[in-house]
Amino acid sequence: MCDQFVGTWKLLTSENFEDYMKELGVGFATRKMAGVAKPNVTISINGDVITIKTESTFKNTEVSFKLGEEFDETTADDRKTKNVITLDNGVLTQVQKWDGKETIIKRRVADGNLVVKRFWGVLVYTKLNMNQECAWAAKGVGLATRKLGGLSKPDVIISMKGDIVTIRTESTFKNTTISFKLGQQFDETTADDRKVKSVVTLEKGSLVQVQKWNGKETTIKRRLVDGKMVVECAMKGVVCTRVYERV
């Protein structure tokens, strides 16, 4: 009944997080450190026990619980809380209490993304997380390959020689290199071993790659935002976003 939540989720967007933490009484330094963290959230189920693990450069936390049963949680900002989580109309609703205070956290899956809303009085804080495995699953990538690919932290090297663009991806999972001319079709064997036909074009500052194989099609967009490279992979309405910084 909670299977839709299972997987590893990567943070995409965050709204009102610092204001929310401030209302909780979280100190300035902790708010700043937590605000720049980009956590991954892994949700798993073993029998009737649900585990939510949050990993980031700020702090790692893990809670395990049964629906409807109270449990203790020490939050990432070190609050000692009492919690109860229930499943209401497809939404995991967590009521968190400490020192006479109370906040509500609601988690739901919408359009393949994990949406987390935290309520404090009239203040609402929203996080949008993308399930990285969903994009690969939509492409037909096998479970073992999805798991290995999801753990890798690739480096991407882009170079140009004349009118030929080369993109090299290096990771502990697999290294790949493609070279192409804009607007011209080329063959590519992807890191997950799909044999594809690709065309890359430059549209409004974005490198847009259309990848086709076995009657399927995915689009990969690469663009620069605030000095970082943002890569969006879209497949059947599922969008996986990865952000790279220049080294």
Image (cartoon, rainbow, N blue to C red):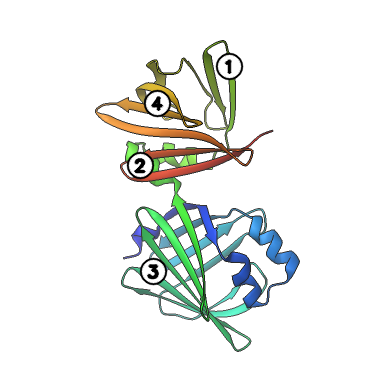
| Mark 4 → mark 3, Cα distance in angstroms | 37 Å
Image coordinates for residue 67, horizontal then vertical, percent: 40, 75
Residue at point 68%, 73% (across, down): 26
* Residue at the (52%, 55%) spot, across then down: 13
**Callout 4: helix, strand or loop?**
loop
Q: Quadrant of residue 235?
A: top left
Kindly identify which numbered label has been placed on residue 193. 4
Residue 137: numbered disc: 2
Name the disc covering residue 160, or none.
1
Tell me where residue 76 appears, x and y as whole percent.
64, 67
Residue 128 in the image: above or below residue 192: below
Q: Give the image location of residue 50, x and y in percent.
A: 44, 66
Name the disc covering residue 48, or none: 3
User: Residue 108's quadrant in the figure?
Assistant: bottom left
Q: Say if mark 2 contacts mark 1, CB within 8 Å.
A: no
- Nearer the observer: mark 4 or 3; the answer is 4
Please identify the residue farthest to the left as the structure is shown. 215
Between the C-alphas of marks 2 and 1, the distance is: 32 Å
Alpha carbon distance from label 4 to label 1: 25 Å
Q: Residues within 10 Å of mark 1 (few under 14, many from 20)?
A: few
**Mark 4 neighbour density, 10 Å: few (under 14) some (14–19) many (20 or more):** few
Q: Nearer the viewer, residue 121 or 46?
A: 121
The image quadrant where one finds the C terminus is top right
Q: Classify residue 48 by image quadrant.
A: bottom left
Residue lying furthest bottom: 100
Amino acid residing under circle 1: Met
Q: In screen coordinates, is 83 left or right of 48?
A: right
Residue 90 appears in the picture as rendered: yes
- 87 in relation to 183, above or below: below
Residue pushed farthest front?
Answer: 204
* Residue 65 falls left or right of residue 2: right
